[in-house]
Image (cartoon, helix red, strand yellow):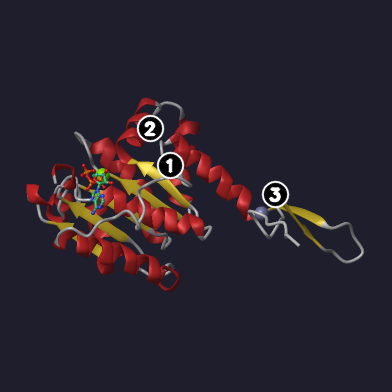
Amino acid sequence: MKQTSYKCDKCCDTGWILIKQENRQPLAVACECRKIEKLKSEWKYSGINVEQSKLTFASFVVWNKASQRMKDTAGAYCTDFDEIRDKRRNSILLCGQVGSGKTHSSIAIALNFLKQHIKVVYMPYRDVITKIKQNMIDEEYYTRTISKYQLCEVLLIDDLFKGKINETDVNIMFEIINYRYLNFLPIIVSTEFSIDRLLAFDEGVASRVYEMSKDYVVEIEKDIRNNYRLK
Ligand SMILES: Nc1ncnc2c1ncn2[C@@H]1O[C@H](COP(=O)(O)OP(=O)(O)OP(=O)(O)O)[C@@H](O)[C@H]1O
Ligand SMILES: [Mg+2]
Ligand SMILES: [Zn+2]
């Protein structure tokens, strides 16, 4: 006989889990899967469909040395994550050459995590920073937005420091990254800048990112031949 299969076995897709209590009515608590669904809708809002995205490990082609390093490091990070997630070096930094697959790999990692119900929040740096600055006078919006990126389980910062940057941008990123640094919360960072350039922008932010990602850093040499878009 065909068995019914649920998307979530914990709550049988009801969204609620009943916890037995002695001499009392069972307590209903929201199931983890609802939080994941909410998160997926946030990803969709940023233009990434978690279920259908093509930015996966399966579609990542190893076509040169740089892509080999990227795939190996991203893969190792996923494999090791459970063990390292509470450690100082619990993050990954993919940096350098434009079009070399940094965003592709970062998202592949995030999708892999989301499948395991590890909650990754996507932060497209430039869009987010622009919006925060436009709403700077709205203190509540500011706090709410910053806290979302400070507190989430894993944060993916895509294209860090893209565009013209000034002191405000650096301060906002410091608030987010320093919080995560102090609380041992992992980040996945993609940026077209080299580590030296990042350090030159702001040593406070960059040295924290570097220390957190030390075991999983891929710096792709600036060479147009490493641009997959032009392959
Ligand atoms: N090794 C690869 N295998 C398959 N597709 C790839 C690979 N590398 C890059 N791509 C594809 O090429 C395009 C550019 O890659 P991606 O956006 O990840 O580059 P990036 O390093 O983040 O560039 P940028 O610095 O401009 O943000 C994407 O469509 C991506 O899916
Ligand atoms: Mg990118
Ligand atoms: Zn559930």
Residue 213 vs residue 100: left or right?
right
Residue 107 in sight from this viewpoint: yes
Q: Which residue is mark 1?
A: 146
Q: Are marks 2 and 3 in contact (CB under 8 Å)?
A: no
Quarter location, residue 185: bottom left
Mark 3, Cα crowd under 10 Å, few <14 / some 14-19 / many 20+, is: some
Neighbour class for label 1 at 10 Å: few (<14), some, many (≥20)? some
What amino acid does circle 1 point to?
Answer: Ile
Q: Is residue 92 left or right of residue 9?
A: left
Q: Is mark 3 within 8 Å of ligand 3?
A: yes
Residue 135 percent location from the top left of the image: 40, 27
Please name the amino acid that badge 3 sits on: Gly
Residue extending furthest toward the front = 1
Which residue sits furthest right?
A: 23
Q: CA distance from mark 1 to mark 2?
A: 9 Å
Query: Can you say whether 226 is above or below 38 in the image?
Result: below
**Could you tell which of marks 3 and 1 lies nearer the N-terminus?**
3
Q: Quadrant of residue 166?
A: top left
Total marks placed: 3
Look at mark 2 in the image and give the residue it sits on: 132
Mark 1 touches mark 2? (CB < 8 Å): yes
